[in-house]
Amino acid sequence: MNPLTLINSDGGLYVDSRDVAQAIERDHSKLLRTIHEYCGYLSESKIGLADFFVEGEYEDAQGKPRPCYLITRKGCDMIANKLTGKKGVLFTAAYVTAFEKMTEQLTTTGTQFFPPKATSAGEVSSLIKNVRNTMERQNSAPIKVARQTELLLRHFRIPVIEDFVEVPSPWEQPVLE
């Protein structure tokens, strides 16, 4: 079995349902019907669909839009729990390995992503304000507060002007009065 390719979209990690169908040797249209059925059960129980499956679309060979799903690790767990035998074991090994590898890469780079579409402007503003207040209580230098603010803004893909943080020149001396 080929390793699964993960998609990093809006800070979430997903596997394309077409890749899953190929991995479990199942027709994609049948997998879509199964996932659609799972989504119905989850919706009835008021369990968040986005934690498992996200509706997507791709263009077929004729350029026509076709449905697919982006599947989270939880969604892969759900699909794998219904599989038995060699196919189930190999699929489970493939998706667990892919998700662990990506998680390890994100951990070693020190990067943690939060889905921007799930984070409102008010939540981002509140986060920045809380970070700023905490840093100021700890007597952090204003330049550090500004740099942290810039990192948060960029993380949530909020445009920042190039010289958002003005770094004082090393030869500038503070004026004492």
Image: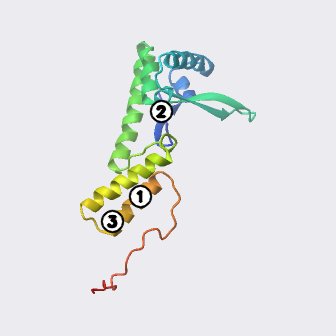
Q: CA distance from mark 3 to mark 1?
A: 11 Å
Inspect the image, locate mark 1, and give the three-letter code of the amino acid beneath it: Leu
Residue 148 vertical placement versus 165 (above, below): above
Query: In which quadrant of the rendered image does the C terminus lie?
Result: bottom left
> Of the numbered discs in the image, which one, if any, rests on residue 4?
2
Which residue appears at 35% of the width and 69% of the height? 143
Which residue appears at 42% of the width and 55% of the height? 152
**Residue nearest the viewer, comparing 158 with 124:** 124
Q: x and y percent of residue 110 in the render?
A: 34, 50
* Residue 83 located left or right of residue 108: right
Q: x and y percent of residue 140 in the render?
A: 27, 65
| Foreground label between 1 and 2 | 1
Taking the view exactly as shown, the residue that stands out farthest to the left is 138
Q: Specify the quadrant of the image occupied by residue 174.
A: bottom left
Q: CA distance from mark 1 to mark 2?
A: 31 Å
Tags 1 and 2 touching, CB below 8 Å: no
- Earlier sequence position, callout 2 versus callout 3: 2
Inspect the image, locate mark 3, and give the three-letter code of the amino acid beneath it: Lys
- Earlier sequence position, callout 3 versus callout 1: 3
Secondary structure of residue under mark 3: helix
Q: x and y percent of residue 53 in the render?
A: 51, 27
Inspect the image, locate mark 2, and give the three-letter code of the amino acid beneath it: Leu
**Residue nearest the viewer, comparing 99 with 55:** 55
Q: Residue under circle 1?
A: 151
- Earlier sequence position, callout 1 versus callout 2: 2
Q: Residue under circle 3?
A: 144
